[in-house]
Image: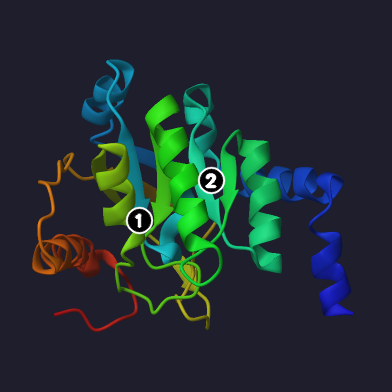
Amino acid sequence: MFKKLRKLATTKLASKIIYWITSSYCATFRLSIINEESWRKYLDEGGRVLLCTWHQQFFSAIRYGKKYRKYHPTLMASKSLDGEIATGVGRQIGWYPVRGSSSRDGGFALKEMADRLKKYGLAILLLDGPRGPAGIVKPGVIKLAQAADAVIVPGYVQVEKAWYFNSWDKFMLPKPFSRVTINFCEMIKLPPIHTETDFENQRLMLEKLLRPYLKGYDNP
C-alpha cells in the first residue's frame, strides 16, 4: 500500500499538490538570507555558480529556490522512486532535474549537469546525497565545478526549532514559525587538479568547512 502511494506521488498532479503543501508550510518560516549578493552579482555578470549543501538541510530552501528560476538552474535527482518525486517537485519550483547519482548513471548525469551549467550558469548539488554517508562530501561536486569552470558556493541552514527524522541524514524539518537562516559562504574558485592528492584535498576542504553545521553528528 505504501509503495503504491509513493508511486502515485510521482504523477504531475501529485507533484503540484506536494509543492503547494511544501511551499505553504515553508511560508510560515521567519526566513533570513545571508551573503547572497556577491554570488548573484557574479552570476548576473556571466559567471558560473555551483551551490552545494548537505542533504539534511535542503528542505528549508525549497520555497525560496523558486526565486532563481530565471537562471534555468539544474539539480541532480537520483533514479530511485524518491528521486522521481523530487524531480516532479523540482520542476514545480522551476529547476531542471538531471537524473542520476554516484551509484546509477552518475557519469552521464554529471556530464549533462556540466553542459547545462556552462550554458545557463547555475546548478545545485547535495554534497552527501542521495544515500550518504552523511557528512561525507562525494566527489561529484569537485568534478562538476572543475568540468564547468564554476565557482563553488557552499551553504548551510541554521534553524531556531526543528524536528530531526530517524533517517540516514537525520533529515531536518523546521518547526512552523521558526526562525530559519540560509547562509551562503564565500565563493570558492578551485585551482586546477594535477594529482589525486589535489582532488582529495579539495574534497576534504569542503567537508571541513561545512561539517560543523551538520546537526546530530559528532563533528571533529
Residue 158 percent across, percent down from the top left: 32, 56
Label at residue 162: none
Residue 174 visible in image: no
The residue under the point 44% across, 52% down is: 110
First of labels 1, 2 by sequence position: 1
Left or right of residue 95, residue 113 in this image: left
Number of other residues with Cα within 10 Å of mark 2, as a class: few under 14, some 14 to 19, many 20 or more? some
**Which residue, as the protein is rendered here, is positioned at the far top?**
45
Q: Amino acid at mark 1?
A: Thr
Residue bearing mark 2:
62
Give the class, few, some or many, for how many residues have Cα within 10 Å of label 1's Cα (few <14, many ≥20): many
Q: Quadrant of the C terminus?
A: bottom left
Number of the label disc, if any, that sits on residue 53: 1
Q: Is residue 220 above or below residue 99?
A: below
Front residue (pair 199, 29): 199
**Near-viewer residue (156 or 33):** 156
* Secondary structure beneath label 2: loop
Q: Nearer the viewer, mark 1 or mark 2?
A: 1
How far from the left and from the top, in percent, is residue 215? 33, 72
Q: Give the alpha-carbon distance from disc 1 to disc 2, as whole Å.
A: 13 Å
Q: Is residue 201 above or below residue 150?
A: below
Residue type at mark 2 is Ile
> For the residue labelled by badge 1, is the local secondary structure a helix, a strand or a loop?
strand
> In the image, is residue 50 above or below residue 7?
above
Q: Is residue 10 left or right of residue 128?
A: right
Residue closest to the eye, 37 or 70: 70
